[in-house]
Each structure stands twice: as structure tokens, then as C-alpha cells.
Image (spheres, grey):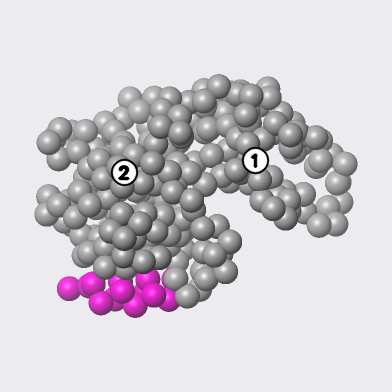
Amino acid sequence: AEQSSIESAYLASHRLWSPFSVLPIVIIYNTKLVSESLIPDNWTSLLNPYFKDHLILANPEIAGSGFTILVTMLHTMAESAEGGAENWPFVRSLMEQLGHGGLVSSSTTVYNAVSEGEYFAGVTFENSVLSLITAGKNVGYRYPVEGTSAVPDGIALLKDAPHAAEAKRFIDFVLGRDVQSVLMTKWFRRSVRNDVPSYTPSLSELNIIQYPIADSAERRNQILSRWSQEYQKSRP
């Protein structure tokens, strides 16, 4: 029932699921350990020797967020370098920045480790950093200037759901204006509705790539196989 109020860019053509909130990917850094001159405001800055062995990422083979981040970097840096559809050389260089513990299974570990000063910087979702800042943690964030993604998470009615009527009402509830209006203030998530005020900066002010949702899903195993091969090569 709320579909007409959802930004069309977030609606899948098959309509098998509906978008719930928008999650831009950002670079998170510890404000106590990273000086102003070294703040990583672009993907390339993560290759600075200062971050070697002090950079943390979620493993894309285990964490869904890690896979989204990998695909985002592959395509953003490829477009930036005009080097084709995917920029594996950049990702390989980034892998070499990771210490022995810099690749973790949980996205939660990434932002908590940076917050606690165990790592200087990492990559995570915008809402995670905002929640830490509100809690008074020593973290900051940047939207990479080369570009980043803002992929919506989703909600769907399960096939043959035993309580389909109630499920449909719940979907309408969470996509309704009341819930969507408090997404940012309560959970630091951006709304998918076109009648809810945008968070600052708005996505139109940022360099947001067209994330290849269908292609990356279809080629997931192939991408992860390449990642595994490159990661093993990057180990000292």
C-alpha cells in the first residue's frame, strides 16, 4: 500500500521485496589515532603506509556487508581509474594493508574495533558510525570522494507465510510515514520514502555509484572465488 511513496530508484523491477532503509558505505576512522592530515576521505588514502596493519574489513565470504563493500570498491575504483568493470589491483593493494587480524567475520567487529582503538580505520555502513558518535565514541567518517554505494536493505513476505495478512500489515507499518520518519533519529538509517525529509548530506550531494545488485548477486561465487585467490596471494 505504501509503494507509491517509495523512491522509484529503490524498487526492484520484479517487486519480490520492498526497500526498508538506505545504507551508504563510509570509511570509519578513530579520531584519537588519525590526525586531521591523515583523515581517509577517499579509497586511495587507505593505501597510505600509515594504515598498514591497522586497517580492518569484514570478510566478504562470511559477512553480507563485506560483500557489498567489496563490490562497491571494485566498481567505484574501476570507474575512477577508467579501468574496466572491476578494479582488482586496487583491492589487492588494500588486502596488503590488512594485518593478520584485519579481516574479520563480523561487520560489528569492524566498527567496534576502530572505536576502541584496536585499528585506525575500516569500512562500514553510515548508520553504524552515527550510532557510535551519538554514544560519544572517538570515531569519525568520510564518504569516499571517488564514490560509494547506498544500497537499500529489504523486507519481504515469505512464500506460504502462515500469517500472511498480519505480515502484510507489518510491511505497510514499517514502510509507512510514521516509522520511516523516525528511522534516522532512532536507528540512524535513511528513509526510502520520497515524502520524508532527507538526512544531511543528502544522497544527491554525494558521489553515489549505481550498485550492480543483479549482476553481483548472479556472479557472487565468481567474485568471492577471485577474492579468495587474491587474498591468499597478498599474504606475506
Give, as a single range, the part of the protein colored magenta. 224-236
Residue 128 spot, x, y in % from top left = 42, 38
Q: Mark 1: which amino acid?
A: Ser
Residue 55 located left or right of residue 143: left
Q: Which residue is disc 1 drawn over?
A: 8
Q: In 3D space, how far apart are the residues under numbered discs 2 and 1 (Cα atoms)?
A: 25 Å
Q: Mark 2: which amino acid?
A: Pro
- The answer to whether residue 96 of the structure is visible from this angle is yes
**Residue 173 magenta-highlighted:** no
How dense is the environment of label 1, judged by Cα within 10 Å: few (below 14), some, or many (20 and up)? few
Residue 108 located left or right of residue 217: left
Residue at image x 31%, y 37%? 142
Q: Which residue is disc 2 drawn over?
A: 144
Give residue 229's quadrant in the image. Answer: bottom left
Secondary structure beneath disc 1? helix
On the rendered image, what quadrant is the N terminus found in? top right
From the image, give the main secondary structure of the stretch colored magenta.
helix
Name which of mark 2 and mark 1 comes first in the sequence. Answer: 1
Residue 94 spot, x, y in % from top left = 25, 60
What number is the disc on residue 236?
none
Residue 209 spot, x, y in % from top left = 44, 49
Residue at image x 20%, y 48%? 45
Please give the count of numbered marks on the rendered protein: 2
